[in-house]
Amino acid sequence: METLDPDRVVEQFAPVVEPLHRSVVAGVREASRTLGRLRLLGAQYAYLHSHLARAIAHEAFAHEPEHGRWRLVGYHGQNGAFWLSDDRWTARVLHSTSEKDVPSAGPNGARQAFYTNQHLFRMEADALVERHDFLVLWRRHLRTEEVLLRLVHTLEPWPHGTKPRIDLSMPLLPDVDEFRGLVFVPREDPDAGSITLPEEELQEETDHGDDLLR
């Protein structure tokens, strides 16, 4: 059985990396400015920041001129849905609280179905043409306030508070050339893999105290 080359995953998402980054960064910054003017930046209003940031990012992406085959799908008015699709793969943009946090599917049947996917790296050579659903998770670095995006591929829903069932976690870097420079590093766990930075860039990230690995 052949496995899907991780480089093909990178190439599939490459056209959307930069416009998505610009959109999410715009959403996060404008949400912070708006809530700051309203004096609503306390921890109890964190939910409001994530919802507002997602709405602004959704609108910003709608005005991005170039993003390959990727386009907005779904109805944003339904709980602020921010979904992208290239007609083969779908990505759902969500907020996460840390570099290790992956929001669980919860009890909703449609969301559980979205989280259920065939293993990317244990499939036949036609894996690329199969439908897959991904999560794009955004967060702000606690110290630097930098907006970071991460691509996650889930295998099945998991109970809240337990280890996420995923086979891919990779940073969506803001520069497409750097994104294409990511290197696949298999985990010891045969059911999981990760993609990380080239060695010299990984050391630089570690020196800055922000581990992009899961």
Image (cartoon, rainbow, N blue to C red):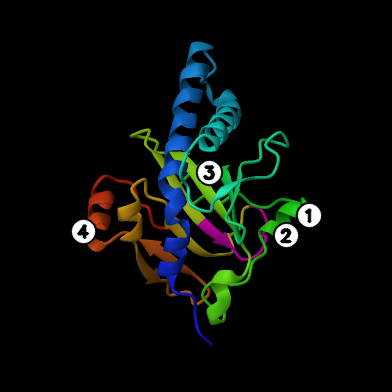
Tell me the residue at 54%/17% (across/down).
40
* Residue 210 picture location, percent across and down: 33, 47
| In this picture, residue 169 sits left or right of residue 176 | right
Q: Amino acid at mark 4?
A: Glu
> Is the Cβ of the residue at disc 2 closer than 8 Å to that at disc 1?
yes
How many dots with numbers? Answer: 4
Circle 3 Cα neighbour tier, 10 Å, few/some/many (<14 / 14–19 / ≥20): some
Q: Amino acid at mark 2?
A: Ala
Residue 195 is inside the magenta segment: no
Which of the numbered marks, if any, corresponds to residue 160? none
- Judging by the rendered image, the residue that carries numbered circle 4 is 200
- Judging by the rendered image, the residue that carries numbered circle 1 is 109
The answer to whether residue 99 shows anywhere in this view is: no
C-alpha gap between disc 2 and disc 4: 39 Å
- Judging by the rendered image, the residue that carries numbered circle 2 is 113
Tell me the residue at 43%/34% (across/down).
25
Which of the numbered marks, if any, corresponds to residue 96? 3
